[in-house]
């Protein structure tokens, strides 16, 4: 009997550790920082341009990436 309880406890602990390990990257992606730093260039990147809301702004949208 005690071995069965130990096996169940081990299964619950392993399941919990597995679930936590799976959700750590998800939780990390939910936490956003104000600055995004490029690892290769060692600088703070500029934010992405706002999405276009009209045809006029759609034409200028690609130029905003330069």
Image (cartoon, rainbow, N blue to C red):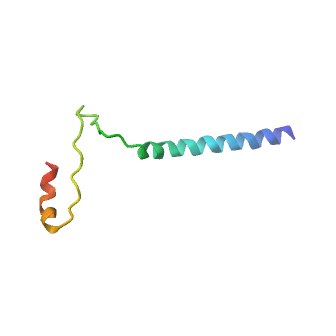
What residue is at 47 percent from the left and 44 percent from the top? Answer: 27
Q: Is residue 15 left or right of residue 53?
A: right
Corner quadrant of residue 35: top left
Q: Is residue 19 left or right of residue 54?
A: right
Query: Which residue lies most toward the right here?
Result: 1
From the viewer's perspective, is residue 8 above or below residue 51? above
What residue is at 31 percent from the left and 40 percent from the top? Answer: 34
Query: Measured from the top left, where is residue 42 in percent x and y?
Result: 24, 31
Q: Report the front residue among 63 and 15.
A: 63
Query: Measured from the top left, where is residue 18 in percent x and y?
Result: 59, 43
Query: Measured from the top left, where is residue 48 in percent x and y?
Result: 23, 49
What residue is at 24 percent from the left and 46 percent from the top? Answer: 47
Q: Report the front residue among 46 and 14.
A: 46
Q: Which of the image's four quarters has the N terminus?
A: top right
From the viewer's perspective, is residue 1 above or below residue 53? above
Query: Measured from the top left, where is residue 40 in percent x and y?
Result: 25, 34
From the viewer's perspective, is residue 51 above or below residue 21? below
Q: Is residue 38 left or right of residue 11?
A: left
């Amino acid at each position: 009997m005690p071995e069965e309880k130990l096996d169940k406890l081990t299964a619950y602990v392993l399941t919990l550790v597995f679930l936590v390990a799976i959700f750590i990257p998800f939780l990390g992606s939910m936490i956003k920082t104000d600055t995004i730093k490029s690892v290769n260039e060692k600088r703070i990147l500029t934010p992405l341009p706002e999405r276009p809301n009209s045809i006029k702004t759609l034409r200028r949208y690609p130029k905003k990436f330069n």
